[in-house]
Image: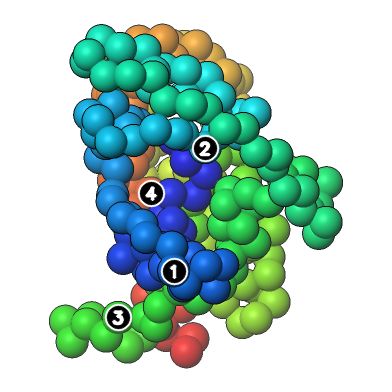
């Protein structure tokens, strides 16, 4: 449930940075860095531990550690609370503290690794799939890519096109859901159709089984058009 988990650095790199920090702070310090496979790690099993450093945010976690230690027959740890450092450069949408979540958000738009060369794929057209929930910025990013010369294929518009009279999904949809979904001019009333399928998984699957393959074919056709235009 972390923010942007794809951008979390690998354990080996994080451990190396931690070692560098500890050596800068106090080269004579003895320490042992271990990966955590669960929320507690060695804190509930190591009898030699005496103290756990927590923040105001993680104090409840420290108290949970002590409860587990008592269950395991181990003495409680002293909980030493430290203050969180404030981030002087945080934006309005970021946390006030220095936060790895904020740091990962700032990495958005950064090329993490060069595009992988796959000999099985043609060099062009280079297809980028742009996905995300409502309000995530798909339209804005598509507009920016379009200004940079990309050929933009809007799947929402294709979704509307398959329903129009003469469109590839028009007759199958009418046959499956009846003439009552039609307006007087013969077009499909999307609200009436939606009322028939939403909340009914079987009917919704029947609709998507008709419509989605047609949208995919239209998208592939548009990709071929983009390729032809260079």
Residue drawn 31% across the image and 55% down it: 32
Marks 4/1: CA–CA distance: 64 Å
Mark toward the start of the polypeptide (4 vs 2): 2
Q: Residues within 10 Å of mark 1 (few under 14, many from 20)?
A: few
Q: Which of the two marks, 4 or 1, is nearer to us in this view?
A: 1
- How far apart are the alpha carbons under marks 2 and 1? 20 Å
**Residue 134 at x, y percent in the picture:** 61, 38
Give SS at disc 1: loop
The residue at which mark 3 appears reads as 116
**Residue 213 vertical placement versus 79 (above, below):** below
Residue drawn where x is 46% and y is 78% of the image: 226
Q: Which mark is residue 81?
A: none
Which residue in the protein does label 1 denote?
Answer: 28
Label for residue 53?
2
Task: Confirm whether residue 31 shows in the render.
Answer: yes
Residue 126 lies in quadrant:
bottom left
Task: Name which residue lies at 28% across and 49% down.
Answer: 35
Q: CA distance from mark 4 to mark 2?
A: 55 Å
Q: Which mark, residue 215? A: 4
Cα distance in 3D space between marks 1 and 3 = 43 Å
Question: Is 17 placed left or right of 48 in the picture?
Answer: right
Q: Secondary structure at mark 3?
A: loop
What is the x, y in percent for residue 200?
35, 10
Which of marks 1 and 4 precedes in the sequence?
A: 1
């Amino acid at each position: 449930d972390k923010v942007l988990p794809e951008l979390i650095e690998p354990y080996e790199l994080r451990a190396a940075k931690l070692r560098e920090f500890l050596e800068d702070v106090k080269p004579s310090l003895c320490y042992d860095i271990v990966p955590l496979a669960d929320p507690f790690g060695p804190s509930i099993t190591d009898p030699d531990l005496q103290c756990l450093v927590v923040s105001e945010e993680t104090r409840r976690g420290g108290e949970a550690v002590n409860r587990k230690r008592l269950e395991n027959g181990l003495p409680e740890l002293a909980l030493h609370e430290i203050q969180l450092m404030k981030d002087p450069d945080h934006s309005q949408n970021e946390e006030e503290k220095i936060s790895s979540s904020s740091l990962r958000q700032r990495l958005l738009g950064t090329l993490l690794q060069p595009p992988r060369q796959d000999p099985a794929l043609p060099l062009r057209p280079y297809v980028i799939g742009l996905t995300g929930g409502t309000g995530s910025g798909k339209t804005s990013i598509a507009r920016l890519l379009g200004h940079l010369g990309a050929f933009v294929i809007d799947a929402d518009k294709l979704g509307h096109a398959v329903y129009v009279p003469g469109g590839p999904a028009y007759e199958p949809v009418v046959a499956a859901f009846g003439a009552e979904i039609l307006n007087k001019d013969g077009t499909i009333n999307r609200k009436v159709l939606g009322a028939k399928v939403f909340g009914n998984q079987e009917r919704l699957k029947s609709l998507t089984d008709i419509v989605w393959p047609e949208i995919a074919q239209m998208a592939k056709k548009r990709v071929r058009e983009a390729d032809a235009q260079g």
